[in-house]
Amino acid sequence: MNTMNFKTWKGVASLLSAAMLALTLAGCGTTTNEGTGTSQPAQEQSQEQAKTDLKTQYPLTVTDATGESFTFDKAPAKIVSVSPAETESLFALGLDEQIVGVSDYDDYPEAATKKPKMGGITKPNEESIIAAEADIVFTGISMSKESVKKLRDLGITIFKTDPKSVDDVMNNIETFGEITDHQEKAQEIITQMKKDVADVTEAVKAVKPEEKKKVYVEFSPGWTVGKGEFMDELITLAGGNNVASDLTGWNQINEENIIASNPDVILYANDVIDENSKTLDQIIKARSGWDQITAVKNDAVIGLDANLLSRPGPRVTQGLKEVAKAIYPDLFK
């Protein structure tokens, strides 16, 4: 994706439906273990069984977004991530000790900033990755298939994700949990993410179709997102209508089309600064004719944490909540 030579945008670095494992809780009785003369509450037994079910059985074979299959005989001991979203997911799973390298742009959590750097997101440092002797390298939406192939040709085992929805994000986290034998933690994360989604959809369900606000999002100067990407889904889940939904994927904007669509709310990444030290909201408001857009006239040009807005990791549903609050502040007081 073209960065347009702007200095601080690093949000976009960076989803198959995640299946939750249900705990079968028995009633109030007890279960007797024959031959031992002991009894154990049925609820405790079911919880212990659930933990056993969440242990990865190796060898494990999984497939990534490029169709490449990987077989693991055991949990990876050394992991590199060259995608901020994947880095967040791996740290959330509790893999700090196993992570031996991250990209230059990885800034969350704090522990990630202390890890050895492996170069950029789209062009990682091949020599550093090889020297790290990682068992698996994770990458995300910002790396092209061609770059992935080049790294694989060098003998690097690289697992690529390409999440298009919140469900895809959760599915990736579940897969990471399976690969690393951290499935129990993965399910905890997914449970919270599903709760975030449910909270938002419940809060906006009363918004009538004709009352849904038109929303425009700009994550880097001159760039927006159309249908088929998770950022577009965030707007939809939050009860808004993306004015760029006639487009597919990441696109450079047509200013006249945005003016004609007249969005009620404009969302932007709040960490963007151009070479003239202008913030993204200043850039947006200074465009010719944009002062006639409802969002600009009503001061509904709202900056959001770029990482929450554009990283398809475990905090993406926190980003969903922020998007919903920005669109319908009265529903989230």
Image (cartoon, rainbow, N blue to C red):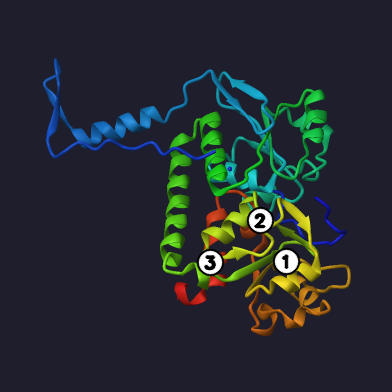
| Quarter of the figure with residue 299 | bottom right
Q: Does any portion of residue 109 appear in the rendered image?
A: no
Q: Which residue is mark 3?
A: 324
Instruction: Please state which amino acid type lies under the numbered disc 1.
Output: Asp
- Residue 46's place in the image compared with 328, above or below, is above
Q: Which residue is mark 1?
A: 271
Q: Are marks 3 and 2 in contact (CB under 8 Å)?
A: no
What is the quadrant of the C terminus in the image? bottom left
- Tell me how far mark 2 sits from mark 1, CA to CA: 12 Å
Q: Which residue is mark 2?
A: 310
Between disc 1 and disc 3, whose residue precedes?
1
Please provide percent x and percent y for residue 309.
63, 59
Give the crowd class for mark 1: few <14, some 14-19, many >=20 residues within 10 Å.
some
Please provide percent x and percent y for residue 161.
65, 38
Q: Are marks 1 and 3 in contact (CB under 8 Å)?
A: no
| Quarter of the figure with residue 277 | bottom right
Between disc 3 and disc 2, whose residue precedes?
2
- Residue 31's place in the image compared with 59, above or below, is below
